Image (cartoon, rainbow, N blue to C red):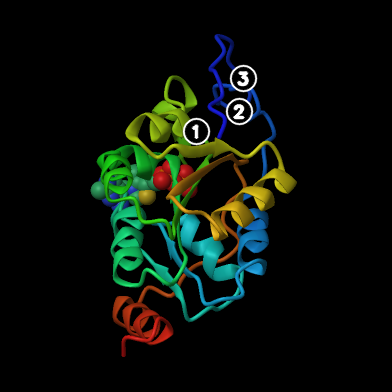
Amino acid sequence: MTIKKQTASRVATSGHTPVAGNDKIMNRYDLICRLTARLTHGEAVIGGIGNTNFDLSAAGARPENFYMLGSMGLACPIALGVAIAQPQRRVFALEGDGSLLMQLGCLATIAQRAPKNLCIIVFDNGVYQITGAQPTPAAGVADIAALAAASGVAASAWAADEADFERLVDQALGAAAPSLIAVRIDAQPAVGATDRDPVQIRERFMRGIGVR
Ligand SMILES: Cc1ncc(C[n+]2csc(CCOP(=O)(O)OP(=O)(O)O)c2C)c(N)n1
């Protein structure tokens, strides 16, 4: 695990603070497709509010996907519950930087509980994109991977590029401790949208993970 040291300069064009090793700007939909292509054992994926779950949905229907509607910061807490309830199943939480920053306490809770089957992926575009691209603290002062490591999620790292992202996902699939992968992403809007039907989302997910 490498924690990248923050540098003093800023990237004005993207609004991101560059951290050694996180200077490649990737695309959320592309990365989510790369993730789901590697999931062959019924892994659960919990998509956070908005763009994150829109792109998860656009990447292809999976019965083990859950789409959080309406509230920021709940992908990780929901994923933690699933990981505890089904320790044999690998679980991924997908969250935006703004949403994770709203619910930072979940990192320490996850570190303390230490489910080895849980991996958090944070899509850092440095903005609250879906509500008008207001800058988040991750654009200036907050380093997501360092925050996670300082909360006790020791296996936290920035993905340097797409190949590194895939390597970190593979590592998470065999990990013996919770992990976090942070990725810098561009300002592309989500590719699709999720059906806003919470009951259907819940029922499909519960069937997908074998509890209905
Ligand atoms: C508790 C809460 N506060 C505010 C909102 C309004 N809201 C919905 S999505 C969003 C921005 C989410 O930002 P981020 O997680 O970084 O994802 P992005 O839109 O950049 O993909 C905001 C402010 C909300 N839905 N819930």
Q: Which of the image's four quarters has the C terminus? A: bottom left
Foreground pick, 116 / 125: 116
Residue drawn at the location 50% of the way across and 33% of the way down: 126
Residue 45 as seen in the image, left or right of residue 22: left
Q: Is residue 68 visible?
A: yes
Callout 1–callout 2 Cβ contact below 8 Å: yes
Residue type, numbered disc 3: Val
Residue drawn at the location 50% of the way across and 67% of the way down: 193
Label 2 SS: loop
What residue occupies the far front of the structure in this picture? 176
Residue type, numbered disc 2: Ser
Residue 148 to residue 47: above or below: above
Callout 3–callout 2 Cβ contact below 8 Å: yes
Q: Which of the image's four quarters has the N terminus? A: top right
Residue identified by numbered label 3? 11
What residue occupies the far bottom of the structure in this picture? 212
Mark 1: C-beta under 8 Å from nearest atom of ligand 1: no
- The quarter of the picture where residue 136 lies is top left
Count of numbered badges drawn on the protein: 3
Query: Between disc 3 and disc 1, whose residue precedes?
Result: 3
* Whole-number angstrom distance, CA of label 3 to CA of label 1: 11 Å
- Disc sitting over residue 126 in the figure: 1
Residue identified by numbered label 2? 14
Callout 3–callout 1 Cβ contact below 8 Å: no
Residue drawn at the location 52% of the way across and 54% of the way down: 175
Residue 33 as seen in the image, left or right of residue 6: right
Query: Between disc 1 and disc 2, whose residue precedes?
Result: 2
* Whole-number angstrom distance, CA of label 1 to CA of label 2: 8 Å
Foreground pick, 194 / 35: 35
* Whole-number angstrom distance, CA of label 3 to CA of label 2: 6 Å
